[in-house]
Image: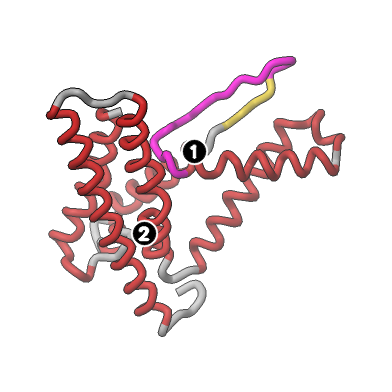
Amino acid sequence: MSVAYAVAAVAYVSVAVLGYAAFGDAVDSNVLLSLAEPMWAIATANAMVVVHFAASYQVRVLCGAREAIWTVNHSSATLQVFTQPVFEAIETALTGRLPALRAHARVMRIGTRGAYVACTGTVAASLPFFGDLMGLISAAGFVPMAILMPVVLWGLARPQKRLAERLLNGTILVTFSLLAVAAFAGSSWRIYQKSRTYAFWS
């Protein structure tokens, strides 16, 4: 688990720190929007973002009598953890109302999940402060559930006897709690500022 957190921290924090170092307060929540050149690097980075998000959705395919789960990419815990119950609820509701869809589960899943991605993408593109909204949601939901709660549950399930382990877990809890509060406050303030001149698709 510590390796996963380290890789995610290096990947995301380095982009945030370098973006702030290069552009200061003028950096956009999507660092790629702050760049002007070289165009090939921007295009490549945008393509990798599309691949990252497309691959983060779990693909489930029915194979005969048993179900095989093919996980393309687990790099985005938010998409994996928080969208699966939504997919399950949508697909259960559809098969409850239209039982004939059970025979075509693969097509139904591709259709419902594709429609879900298209709808959320459209909403994201229409909001001028989507990056700040994601910061607010992450600070209020993702950080407590994906970073703080595992540390607390690990401590409850396996009491730490070594001082170093207790200090490390305590440092993680305090540091990320403070970061979540700061991110929540900062995102709220930026949303408030941008809401004065709010316009769809801007």
- Residue shown at 38%/73% (left/top)? 191
Quadrant occupied by the C terminus = bottom left
Q: Is residue 76 magenta?
A: yes
Q: What secondary structure is found at the residue carrying circle 1?
A: helix
Give the amino acid type for the residue marked by disc 1 in the picture. Gln
In percent of width and height, residue 123 lies at 54, 63
Task: Say the numbered circle drawn on residue 97.
Answer: none
Q: Above or below — where is 51 with respect to 198?
A: above
Quadrant assignment, res 120 = bottom right
In percent of width and height, residue 42 lies at 31, 53
In percent of width and height, residue 134 lies at 41, 58
Q: Is residue 18 magenta?
A: no
Q: How is the image coloured?
A: secondary structure
Among numbered discs 1 and 2, the one appearing first in the sequence: 1
Front-most of residues 131 and 139 = 139
Q: Which residue is mark 2?
A: 135
- Residue shown at 23%/55% (left/top)? 178
Quadrant occupied by the N terminus = top left
**Inter-mark Cα distance, 1 to 2:** 18 Å
Q: Which residue is mark 1?
A: 80
Q: Is residue 54 left or right of residue 6?
A: right
Task: Give the magenta part as a residue range.
Answer: 63-78
